[in-house]
Image: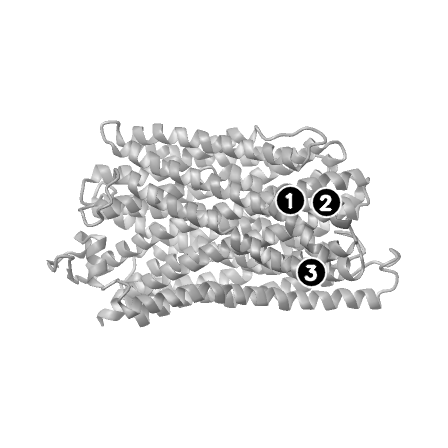
Amino acid sequence: MEALFYAVPVASLLALVFAFVFYRQMKKEDEGTPTMKQIAKYVREGAMAYLKQQYKVVVIVFIILAVLFAILAYGFGVQNPWVPFAFLTGGFFSGLAGFVGMKTATFASGRTANACRRSLNGGLKVAFRSGAVMGLTVVGLGLLDIALWFIILNAFYPANDAQNLVIITTTMLTFGMGASTQALFARVGGGIYTKAADVGADIVGKVESDLPEDDPRNPATIADNVGDNVGDVAGMGADLYESYCGSILSTMALGASAFYAISPEMQMKAVLAPMLIAAVGVVLSVISIFTVRTKEGAGMGQLLKSMSFGTNLAAILSGVATFGILALVFGTEDSNWWHFSLSVVSGLCAGVIIGKSTEYYTSHSYKPTQKLAESSQTGPATVIISGVGLGMRSTAIPVVTIAAAIILAFLFATGFNADIMAPGVLSTGLYGVAIAAVGMLSTLGITLATDAYGPIADNAGGNAQMSELDPQVRERTDVLDALGNTTAATGKGFAIGSAALTALALLASYIEEIKIALARVGEAIVGVGGKIIENASDATILDVLSNYNVSLMNPAVLAGVFIGAMMAFLFCGLTMDAVGRAASKMVLEVRRQFAEIKGILTGEGTPDYKRCVEISTRAAQHEMLVPSLIAIIVPVLTGVLLGVAGVLGLLIGGLGAGFVLAVFMSNSGGAWDNAKKFVEEGHCGGKNSECHHATVVGDTVGDPFKDTSGPSLNILIKLMSMVSIVMAGLTVGFHLL
């Protein structure tokens, strides 16, 4: 059985090899004219300078946290001694995934613009294959990190022992916390950077001065293009790296505990299953990437079909392959192979439905966004009102879909046994929900490729505009960019949906970590039937819930729920304010340059691009700390003040409010962006009309919605869970003193 495990590192290496192949193919493409090369160089240098500054800040935070974990592990003995090291590697690999993706994107955008001089399909191929570098790097590094830690910990805690396997998998969750912490800094910092530049460029450039998108006369245009890379590529790569790893790690931890009392062999099967599903998903993603292509003159609908064909093919093949994988792992004589396979399929189907729902509400090929654009005829106020309403309506399908997926995955896993009081039913059902999240993200290699492709196409359009290429080139890049807005929104939907399923599994993993902490101090607990359980590691989830009185009648639980729901709104408020402050500085700077530097608007003067890049960089570094740190501090304080019951309430409240708020903000922002694109294509008066100005205002409101606050919420949900798990020993120990 353990021999199957080596398919995981092999799949990770396969992903990294193809990522390198696609990277080399991209580098062989011509970057274009000397002007195109120079503009691409400006963007590349600005992006790398920002990332260098961000990593300096993040390294300091990581060192402080690692020292804290070391003190708890070696000084007080409330944590596994491997925790500090796992935490650091999680952050390192998450940052590395974002770095590789951004480096690729900054080389690819100019080459995409040059390829669009030849054909639309040429531009699509370069941009999409470059996006695939990000997708395959994320899944490759994620599986590699998981495989390496499993091998290392197995050497010290032989996995053939049931208790050791629980220790291994719960310890590995710590590197998930490292990945989540890095991802939150990357998403928040990158989001503040890119939206400060974007809003400043739009308000002064488009609305006040009637300049086209990415006009070289606009001082903020280079900072805007840099922001696309640091926020929408580096930030997104780190974000989905932690989503991908989090879903696998939480399922492994839950599998180790759910089947702890059955047999070591069954337990090992449950731990291996999510890794193998992810490994096969890598292979299928590579195959599907080669199917994405289009023809010259393709419209938005045809391009969407091209992208959808690749992602849907990967999802279908993954669903079919799951039955074979789990039959091999569990054996056909055990009904678990098809029970859990159906749970995986429920996750895959949920992902497809959420993706289609997001596409419907955010693409200007469909009525909702077209009607949003039409609301611009009565001014920016109605654009904003309509966009808020659209975003709120758009939450219905994803929420109902996730609710249905949770119930179906639970029932499939338990063989339709809904009696959670029966032995093993609750933990087995939760394992089914967790593995459904793995199914949803199993084809992340191609799903993320469709997402990372968007910023590359956007930057290609900027390069074409600033290089004054033939208008037909800009038309082609605009088509690719509009498609990128929709695929980016779809990618965010996948991340948010998987966060909901993963967070539920992390709740169960938190309880397992509480059991380990209790067993470490030799504390007995009272079981559901009032019996005393001397060894806490033998307790069930229901035993622990009963012991800590986790019910809606417990004021600590209710207080935690309210605090968790508040956290989602407080976090969004802080990040929105941060963008607002940074954008205000950018607006004032652009206005200053227009007023003081002679000849900018006539093309005779040269804007000070560097100054705008510096403003975004400083603002992002300064503003990202408070929102990111409260996500770490609040779960710790809640555990100290309200105990285990309060922490569980916190995680439930954060999950419920955060998931719905994230869908609302991401979809509203995506719809506002594409409504602007719809008007720019010639509808409702076209460019520089009053309708266009109104949709630009809507887009500036939507920018931090969809690229800063909204996508960061799914990280917040999981990071609070990860912090709670890692600090479970402190929570238990504090209340036993």
Which three-letter amino acid code belongs to the residue tagged 1? His
Residue 581 placement (x, y as % from top left): 63, 69
Could you tell whether 340 is left or right of 471 in the image? left
Q: Which residue is mark 3?
A: 380
Disc 2 is placed on an element classified as helix
Q: Earlier in the sequence, mark 3 or mark 1?
A: 1
Q: Is residue 697 above or below residue 313?
A: below
Q: Nearer the viewer, residue 674 or 167?
A: 674
Tell me which residue sits at (68%, 33%) in the image: 28
* CA distance for labels 3 and 1: 18 Å
* CA distance for labels 2 and 3: 26 Å
Q: Is residue 584 above or below residue 660?
A: below
Nearer to us of marks 2 and 3 is 3
Q: Is residue 190 visible?
A: no
Quadrant hosting residue 665: bottom right
Q: Which residue is mark 2?
A: 461
Q: Earlier in the sequence, mark 2 or mark 1?
A: 1
| Numbered label tally | 3
The residue positioned farthest toward the left in the image shown: 531
Q: Is residue 440 above or below residue 535?
A: above
Tell me which residue sits at (68%, 63%) in the image: 614
Q: Which label was assigned to residue 560?
A: none
Q: Nearer the viewer, residue 223 or 543?
A: 543
Q: Which label was assigned to residue 364?
A: 1
